[in-house]
Amino acid sequence: MINNTLNEQISFSILMANYNNANYIEEAIRSVILQTYPLWELIIVDDCSSDNSIDIIKPFLKDKRIKLICNERNIGYGGSLRRAADNASNMIFGILDSDDKLHETALDVMAGAYKRNSQFGFIYSTCWGCDSELKNCVINKDIGTFRNIKSVFFREKISHFKTFKKEAYQKTSGFNVNQKKAVDKDIILKLEEVTNIKFINKPLYYHRYHENQISQGKYEFEAFVYYYRAKCKAYQRRLNTNFPNCTLKELYFQYFYIIFHKLILVLKKCLKFFRIPVFFIKIHKLTPKILIIRLEELKSLIKFL
């Protein structure tokens, strides 16, 4: 599918941040090497991995298109992507997580899309959602175009494979080094303020679901909090502008949701640590039954929490 002119020499810098993904990173790197479109570089930033990630990466450095940068201290996903972007030299950036992989035609399709749609600075596709072995893959139907929705604020439909022009990225403040999670949503909010966004309805990316992902499973709530922070900053940037913005009411609602969720977590710990059920049993003997929760209801409540 490669054009004879290599799509007018459109070139890609694939940004990859890695932390302890030794089990998956080889497959991610190989998916870049196997691209049918040859004009790319892969910049890997290792964030002080404690596994054997570096040993797996080093043999691939024989390919001069692959660069490895090792952080001296752990700076998180946002900081690592920022460092990769700072060392990128090609005209289009693409994000590939070190536990996922690209379809072999991903860059070829994207290069053609940028050639046909030069007015767009951000182009993304849909992806396959897969299990931890990259099997049982299903196209993610939640990803799509904005249609009448004017901002990712109001419908979060942008996901993998995300690519954007270097010149558009440089108009923003870039990846936030303090954004440990929801990094992609933060940069999307920034990019939609400086460029047009286009969707390609074709899966080009294999997204792996596993328990150690930074924004899923046990980390999902923390990712929600970081996304809320990104929304608050976007809200401030968009004040007194024509950019679509959320309201303070919406931000307050999410703020109180976060507070409520944290209170529930504190209550869970208290119930476990202070043996509050025992306390209620003692109170039960001293208080008229009509004034307290029945023990059966209390046990159900504790189980629910």
Image (cartoon, rainbow, N blue to C red):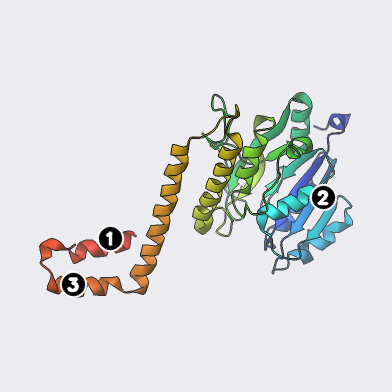
The amino acid on which the numbered mark 2 sits, given as a three-letter code, is Asn
Determine which residue is flagged by label 3. Answer: 283
Residue nearest the viewer, comparing 241 with 50: 241
* Mark 1 or mark 2, whichever is nearer to me: 2
Determine which residue is flagged by label 2. Answer: 87
In the figure, 176 relative to 39: above or below?
below
Q: From the viewer's perspective, is 64 left or right of 248?
A: right
In the figure, 1 relative to 272: above or below?
above
Q: Is residue 65 visible?
A: yes
Question: Hey, which quadrant is residue 117 in on the image?
Answer: top right
Question: Hey, which quadrant is residue 250 in on the image?
Answer: top left
| Residue neighbourhood size for the residue with mark 1, other residues' Cα within 10 Å, grouped as few (<14), some (14–19), many (≥20) | few
Contact check, label 1 and label 2, Cβ < 8 Å:
no
Give the x, y percent position of residue 103.
71, 42
State the mark number for residue 142. none
First in sequence, mark 3 or 1: give its number: 3
Q: Is residue 203 visible?
A: no
Determine which residue is flagged by label 1. Answer: 301
Give the x, y percent position of residue 106.
73, 39
The amino acid on which the numbered mark 3 sits, given as a three-letter code, is Ile
**Quadrant (top left/top right/bottom left/bottom right) for the C terminus:** bottom left
In the figure, 274 relative to 136: above or below?
below
